Amino acid sequence: MGRVIAIDLGTKRTGLAVTDVLKITANPLETVETSKLADYLTQYFSKEEVETIVIGYPKSLDGSDNEMTPRVISLKDRLGKIFPDKNIVLVDERYTSKMAMQSMIAMGSKKKDRKEKAGNLDKISAAIILQTYLQQI
């Protein structure tokens, strides 16, 4: 039984989150440079059994595509070719960045720390995307 990994794609950085083996909890994993995402996933998959890749699907508040939507579709297609044995799912990611910021505030993170630790925001956003997926299955 494999884990589920989630991706919050960014232009420079990409946040990753992963489930436990039983697929009960979503945990922030890592923030990687977007240009190195495929290499990171290849290495991670060589160590951990992952059956599903969940990618945050960006939409505008009205449900229309935004500037990141084509990049996510392209990533989904690319990962499908690189990892044909993985199930790849898109999950609506509207509000995840805002929810991640609220989570950091709730955990007591100061404004200065939140600005310096943008990578944490990406990982937390990925964890929220993953939790959304887990609630749907």
Image (cartoon, rainbow, N blue to C red):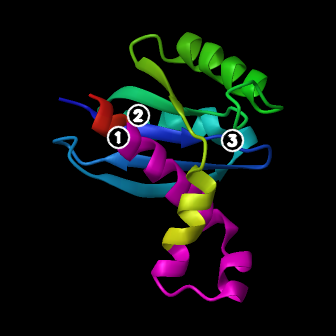
Q: CA distance from mark 3 to mark 2?
A: 14 Å
Q: In the figure, is residue 79 to the left or right of 27?
A: right
Prevailing SS of the magenta stretch: helix
Relative to the observer, which residue lies in front, 44 or 123? 123
Which residue is located at x 54 percent, y 13 percent? 80
Give the labeled residue for mark 2: 45
Establish if 11 lies above or below 49.
Answer: below
Q: Position of residue 25 (x, y in %)?
A: 26, 51
For marks 3 and 2 on the same chain, the one whose residue lies earlier in the sequence: 3
Q: Secondary structure at mark 1?
A: helix
Asked if residue 64 shows in the view, the reply is yes
Cβ atoms at labels 2 and 1 below 8 Å apart: yes
Give the labeled residue for mark 1: 47
Find out whether residue 131 is within the magenta segment: yes
Amino acid type, label 2: Phe
Give the labeled residue for mark 3: 36
Q: Position of residue 84 (x, y in %)?
A: 46, 10
Q: Quadrant of the C terminus?
A: top left
Q: CA distance from mark 2 to mark 1?
A: 5 Å
- The magenta stretch is 104-132
Which residue is located at x 79 percent, y 31 percent? 66
Q: In the figure, is residue 86 to the left or right of 111?
A: left
Amino acid type, label 1: Lys
Q: Quadrant of the N terminus?
A: top left
